[in-house]
Image (spheres, rainbow, N blue to C red):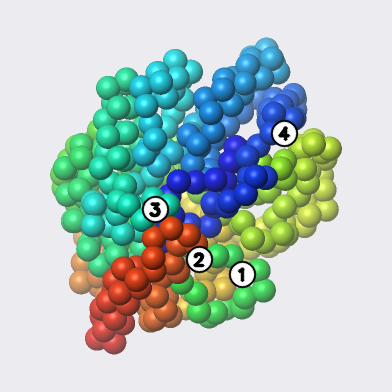
């Protein structure tokens, strides 16, 4: 649920924020959206994931109204969950108490230590944000609000290495972590090998995560959970999978924009083929039966059929559709028959049974960012901080990555 696309940060890689008076969800759209989600008799479990922009730029009354609407339209036996993603720079005791009282699960966006966070996630005035995020996290802990941290992994984090990231996790005492490979703007018309930035390919991310898995396993603290490892380990144990391991998730996950437009997942923003209707005049049954969604499901079925012969298909189910969307356009190592997750799956499987692991030097070579994805500086924020510090820093990183690639 995109209650707003307004944001108080200007992250270098962000596709989500917008400005303007039409970027906040009206009560009419909120009411129609919640009613449509909860009155569909196939929706026995409904999870509202509140996302931005920055979610706490909305007044708390917006969420109070949402809670009242959920109570109004909830069907007998229906389970309702609320999750909220925040940059945590604006949290107060009132927000923390509201989250605790209403059993919200919180995701905090934090990309690493101050030298990473403050460079890539400054506020709209160009000021650092790390200390404010840390204060917000401590407030959540004080009020016993369950939260996890979501990090975007780009060339900076790759070059710093898995040990540096895990040291940071230990330093902050983080217990729940999710890692997102940085993604470029969607280019629907792009063909294979179209250059783009910023982009962390599956092979680069897989090698990095393999090193991180080794460090996490060696540390031995099972109370630290890393979503990408949990997803694979649960699949290996035939347990519940996360959404990225669902394979064919079309029709199960939707995003509702402030104006009521319904799309499949915010990852496909910018590609109108993935926008299906508007909840001011459509319901979810109509959207699911519509020609656009049905066409995408047939396309996804064809993609999955091409990957079905992979030895690990029963685990990954073809992985996330957006990963293939990007790989088929930008990844030099793209293969029709593999989603790109096999290296990490094989590594985790081998460590679970005590078999020899992939040589770390080989993984380090694989995770060196390709020239294709690093030869252009990272896009600058739209507003706020001047481009100078970003340009200089990213040119240095790109040069270092290009030199590493040249030495392979």
Kindly state the secondary structure of the residue where label 3 is placed: loop
Residue 289 drawn at (x, y percent):
82, 44
Q: Is residue 256 left or right of residue 360?
A: right
Q: Residues within 10 Å of mark 4 (few under 14, many from 20)?
A: many
Residue pointed to by mark 1: 187
Residue pointed to by mark 4: 29
Q: Nearer the viewer, residue 349 or 178?
A: 178
Instruction: Name which quarter of the figure residue 322 lies in.
Output: bottom right
Can you tell which mark lies on residue 184? 2
Residue 338 drawn at (x, y percent):
51, 66
Q: Upstream in the sequence, badge 4 or badge 3?
A: 4
User: Rounded to the nearest whole Å, what is the CA distance between mark 2 and mark 4?
Assistant: 29 Å
Q: Can residue 210 be seen?
A: no
**Quadrant of the drawing holding the N terminus:** top right
Q: Upstream in the sequence, badge 1 or badge 4?
A: 4
Q: Upstream in the sequence, badge 2 or badge 4?
A: 4
Q: Residues within 10 Å of mark 3 (few under 14, many from 20)?
A: few
Q: Nearer the viewer, mark 1 or mark 4?
A: 4
Residue pointed to by mark 3: 125
Kindly state the secondary structure of the residue where label 1 is placed: loop
Kindly state the secondary structure of the residue where label 4 is placed: helix
Q: Residues within 10 Å of mark 1 (few under 14, many from 20)?
A: some
Q: Upstream in the sequence, badge 2 or badge 3?
A: 3
> Which residue is situated farthest in the bottom direction here?
406
Q: Are marks 1 and 2 in contact (CB under 8 Å)?
A: yes
Q: Is residue 46 left or right of residue 224?
A: right
Q: Is residue 377 left or right of residue 51?
A: left
Residue 11 drawn at (x, y percent):
42, 56
Q: Upstream in the sequence, badge 1 or badge 3?
A: 3
User: Rounded to the nearest whole Å, what is the CA distance between mark 4 and mark 3?
Assistant: 31 Å
Figure check: 148 above or below 145: below
Q: Are marks 2 and 3 in contact (CB under 8 Å)?
A: no
């Amino acid at each position: 649920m995109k209650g707003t696309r307004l944001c108080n940060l200007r992250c270098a890689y962000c596709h989500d924020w917008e400005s303007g008076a039409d970027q906040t969800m009206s009560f009419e759209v909120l009411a129609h959206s919640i009613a449509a989600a909860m009155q569909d008799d196939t929706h026995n479990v409904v999870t509202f994931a509140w996302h931005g922009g920055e979610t706490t730029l909305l007044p708390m009354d917006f969420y109070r109204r949402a809670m009242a609407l959920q109570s109004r339209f909830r069907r007998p036996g229906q389970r309702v969950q609320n999750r909220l993603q925040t940059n945590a720079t604006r949290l107060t005791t009132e927000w923390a108490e509201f989250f605790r009282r209403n059993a919200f699960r919180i995701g905090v966006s934090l990309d690493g230590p101050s030298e990473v966070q403050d460079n890539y996630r400054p506020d709209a005035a160009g000021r650092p944000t790390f200390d404010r995020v840390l204060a917000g996290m401590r407030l959540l802990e004080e009020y016993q609000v369950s939260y996890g941290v979501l990090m975007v992994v780009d060339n900076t984090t790759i070059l710093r290495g898995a040990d540096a990231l895990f040291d940071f996790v230990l330093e902050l005492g983080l217990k729940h972590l999710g890692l997102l490979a940085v993604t470029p703007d969607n280019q629907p018309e792009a063909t294979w090998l179209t250059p783009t930035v910023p982009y962390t390919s599956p092979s680069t991310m897989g090698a990095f995560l393999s090193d991180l898995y080794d460090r996490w396993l060696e540390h031995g603290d099972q109370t630290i959970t890393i979503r990408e490892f949990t997803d694979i380990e649960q699949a290996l144990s035939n347990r519940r999978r996360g959404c990225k391991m669902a394979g064919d998730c079309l029709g199960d996950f939707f995003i509702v924009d402030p104006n009521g437009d319904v799309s499949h997942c915010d990852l496909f923003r910018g590609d109108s083929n993935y926008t299906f209707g508007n909840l001011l005049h459509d319901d979810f049954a109509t959207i699911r039966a519509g020609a656009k969604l049905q066409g995408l499901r047939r396309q996804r079925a064809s993609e999955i059929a091409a990957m079905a012969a992979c030895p690990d298909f029963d685990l990954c189910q073809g992985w996330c559709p957006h990963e293939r969307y990007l790989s088929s356009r930008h990844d030099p190592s793209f293969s029709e028959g593999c989603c790109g997750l096999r290296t990490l799956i094989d590594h985790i499987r081998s460590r679970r049974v005590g078999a020899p692991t992939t040589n770390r030097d080989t993984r380090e070579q694989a995770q060196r960012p390709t020239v294709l994805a690093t030869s252009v500086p990272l896009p600058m924020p739209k507003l706020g901080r001047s481009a100078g510090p970003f340009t200089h820093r990213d040119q240095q990183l790109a040069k270092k990555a290009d030199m590493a690639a040249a030495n392979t």
